[in-house]
Image: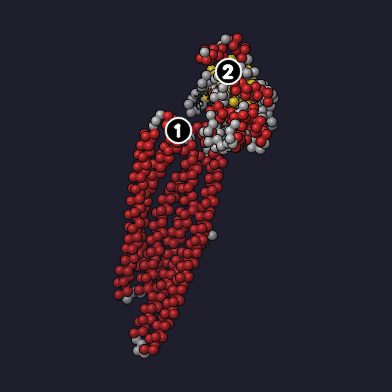
Amino acid sequence: MGTLATVAANILSIVPARLIKHAFELMQKGIAGDHTLTDISLHANTYNRLTGKILFYSGMILLATVLRGLFSFLARWRIAVAGKRIEYALKNEIYTHYQTLPLRFYRRNNTGDMMARISEDVNQVGMYLGPAIAHGLNTVVMLLMLIPYMLIINAHLTRYAVLPILILAAGTYYISTLMKERAETIQDQLSRLTTFVQESFSGIRTLQAFAREANSTNVFAEQCDTYKTQYLRLTTINAIFFPVTRSIIGLGAVLVVFVGGQAVISGTNTPGNIAEFVMYVNLLGWPIFALSWVNHIVQRAAASQKRINEFLQERNPITSKKSLKSPIKGRIAFENVSLIYPNSGIKALQSINLEITPGKIVAIVGATGAGKSTIARLISRLDDADTGTITIDGIPIQDYDVSFLREQLGYVPQDALLFSDTLKNNIAWGKPQATDTQIAQAAQLAAIFDSIQALPKQMETMVGEKGATLSGGQKQRIAIARALIRIPKILILDDCLSAVDAQTASHILRNIKHTMKKSTTLLISHNVVASQLADQVLVLEEGVLVEQGTHEELLAHKGAYYALYKQQHTQLV
Ligand SMILES: Nc1ncnc2c1ncn2[C@@H]1O[C@H](COP(=O)(O)OP(=O)(O)OP(=O)(O)O)[C@@H](O)[C@H]1O
Ligand SMILES: [Mg+2]
């Protein structure tokens, strides 16, 4: 519909020129004929007839112009709507795709880049889909219709009319590459500026604590200045470009009048034809002008679409082999499991063998970088092991449907994140259909309920961005409540009692032990205090499982665990 409307609008933009030609010729004939008349009464008669005709032509021109406006509105509107719909679909597609991508993808790429692709790059493609297609189509239709038509009417004059326009086309092509380069540097500078601002706000605590505000302000001012200078360079081109374009189009009109005028003098052409051609030159000028702009947009859109496709073509290797959806009990077994992180080449786990029975609290302890979090990530399938098998209830973990498996887990990552929402919604995030009583119960289990009740707005309190209004320990306990509300089959607490005092920690663990009788709890920590309450302790050292047993057994064994225990106790004393 948009295309048809474009064709109609272009035909209607040629019509007025034709009508003007006829009106001119009519006048010319009328006046020329008039000179031969001698009777004065016939004069008035002729003028009346001419005026009537001219009025008729004027009316027709007006009608054509109005209709043309209507059709170009229709064309742009239909094409813009289609463009916006595609842009919307593309945005949704990218967002949905991002969410399917594995943790490894997120480690490789930074947030700023991903945000840029879903917003700025999609906008560029959107510019192409809407305005660029509309103008491009208009130009092509106009050139294909008008130039042959002009050639048929007057090939001689067409050559002169088209000449300056060709110069304009070449000139705009050159200038548009220049503009493109400058626009790109502006875009780069803008993203540098945004990254700087974003980082300084998210790191405001560090920034202020180190008294670096003045420095930060200076850097910002410098970056802004660079941005301004670059923008001014682009504005200069723009400012020169438009008047020059107008002049060249005007030059075309002058050339047509000059060459055509000579033809009129020699009697081979009519003034009407010249008037018509002057209008054609003006009609051609704008599409040519738009063509370079369209070219620029198409190039930027192509570059953006390429960037978008790079991410859309990424596939998640973590898939399910059999899409099994049988409920799990929580028996976990590792057989010869090894993992090397591809980006760092670090052997995070080496031939791990372990077995965890449901209903037990199992502590995984070890120094920093021992591979504790890696085990948690393998169980929740955020990563897959290189070799060895991990089974849950005797079934290989790869056979379970990935989402189905994760829904039965309660995983509190080491850097658990709270969302800028109410406390209630942050807890219910683990189980969206939870009732108020369930939310309160979960908060009680995580030993945070009383603190919440003491707040003026209680459960409706907003936690700032990333939980900015809460203390470290409070954040950890909300995150635990969020996992507990699911009453998961496997609960994984990755170092999330580190900011909680020993007494509260043991209180929470007793609660967990009581409510999670049938499910498995993995308690990851480098603090041996918490592991005293565990049924079983696994000790990791540089990716190797060096010891396992109960707290007492391991102490009696006087090995790695004992060393760790003694070290922490002497530190306390
Ligand atoms: N995404 C990653 N890419 C590359 N190497 C990683 C990655 N995550 C962890 N590692 C490396 O793997 C090893 C084990 O890391 P892991 O996070 O499992 O340690 P951890 O025992 O949880 O340590 P912490 O107590 O400090 O949390 C470390 O040497 C670490 O540097
Ligand atoms: Mg860790």
Amino acid type at image mark 2: Val
Residue visible at 47% across and 65% down in the picture: 68
Q: Is residue 431 visible?
A: yes
Q: Earlier in the sequence, mark 1 or mark 2?
A: 1
Secondary structure beneath dot 1 equals: loop
What's the image's color scheme? secondary structure
Q: Residue at x 34, y 45 (%)?
A: 229
Would you say 531 lies left or right of 294 here? Answer: right
Q: Which amino acid is tagged 1?
A: Gly
Name the foreground residue: 353 vs 499: 499
Residue 188: tell me if it is visible.
no
How many other residues sit within 10 Å of disc 2, few (<14), some (14-19) or many (≥20)? some
Q: CA distance from mark 1 to mark 2?
A: 32 Å
**Left of 260 or right of it: where is 103?**
right
The image shows residue 403, relative to residue 522, as above or below, that is below
Q: Secondary structure at mark 2?
A: helix
The quarter of the rendered structure image containing the N terminus is bottom right
Q: Is residue 500 above or below residue 214?
A: above
Looking at the picture, how far across and down is residue 405, in whole percent? 64, 31
Outermost residue, bottom side: 39
Q: Nearer the viewer, residue 49 or 152?
A: 49
Give how far across and how far down residue 447 sits, in percent. 62, 27
Residue 159 appears in which quarter of the rendering? bottom left
Residue 529: numbered disc = 2
Q: Which residue is mark 1?
A: 203
User: Looking at the picture, how far across and down is residue 12, in whole percent?
Assistant: 47, 67
Disc 1 within 8 angstroms of ligand 1 (CB): no
Residue ID at (42%, 64%): 146
Q: Position of residue 441 (x, y in %)?
A: 66, 30
For image coordinates 36% across by 87% down, the residue present is: 37
